[in-house]
Image (cartoon, rainbow, N blue to C red):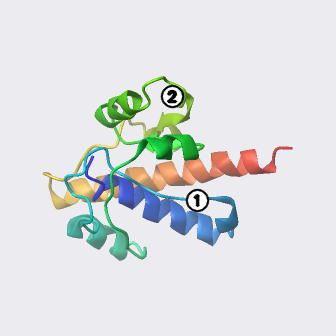
Amino acid sequence: MGNICRSPAAEIVFRHRVNEAGLQKNFVIDSAGTTNYQQGNPPDPRMARVLQKRGYSVSGTARKIQPQDLEDSQLILVMDRENRDDLLALDGDGRNRHKIRYLTDFCRKFQAAHVPDPYCGSAQDFENVADLIEDACAGLLEFLKKNLESP
């Protein structure tokens, strides 16, 4: 929603995995929120601590998704139903609907319908969200690598 917890965490984790795989030239990785409430703010300090503890470099500022993002992107990953509904509304004619998927669709170890928002939660909630995101990003990269290898 605000682009300071889950979405930037996914961007950071996925970028890290892509860089480790040497595939950075194949991807443009970005995150955005569905509201402008946190626009211009850095990632939430609690999420940043969890990610830094796991060896990730944390950077970025929150921004709100724009209609052009739907056009420019090949895949748009959402964290929960509310964000999905907001994006579907932004995509008025439904032309980009097929690009919108849940990040958790790519989980391999965990079974989750969505990534819960840890913002009002405990330190453990942030850890749990990071676990889900790491799992989903590993599965996402595996999925995308297969598509890169396809003729």
Amino acid beneath label 1: Val
- The residue sitting at 44% across, 41% down in the picture is 67
| Position of residue 145 measured from the top left corner of the image (x, y, whole percent) | 70, 52
Q: Secondary structure at mark 1?
A: loop
Q: Is residue 147 left or right of residue 76?
A: right
- Give whichever of 1, 105 is nearer the camera: 1
Q: Is residue 130 left or right of residue 20?
A: left
| Position of residue 39 measured from the top left corner of the image (x, y, whole percent) | 26, 59
First in sequence: mark 2 or mark 1?
1
- The residue sitting at 68% across, 70% down in the picture is 22
**Residue denoted by label 1:** 28
- Looking at the rendered image, the quarter that the C terminus falls into is top right
Q: Is residue 107 visible?
A: no
Amino acid beneath label 2: Arg
| Position of residue 17 measured from the top left corner of the image (x, y, whole percent) | 56, 64
Q: Residue furthest right?
A: 151
- Give whichever of 64, 49 is nearer the camera: 64
| Position of residue 122 measured from the top left corner of the image (x, y, whole percent) | 15, 56
Q: CA distance from mark 2 to mark 1?
A: 20 Å
Look at the picture and state if 90 lies above or below 93. below
Q: Residues within 10 Å of mark 1 (few under 14, many from 20)?
A: few
Q: Are marks 2 and 1 in contact (CB under 8 Å)?
A: no
Q: Is residue 24 visible?
A: yes
Q: Is residue 92 left or right of residue 45?
A: right
Look at the picture and state if 31 lies above or below 75. below
**Residue denoted by label 2:** 97
- The residue sitting at 42% across, 56% down in the picture is 10
- The residue sitting at 44% across, 65% down in the picture is 12
Q: Residues within 10 Å of mark 2 (few under 14, many from 20)?
A: some
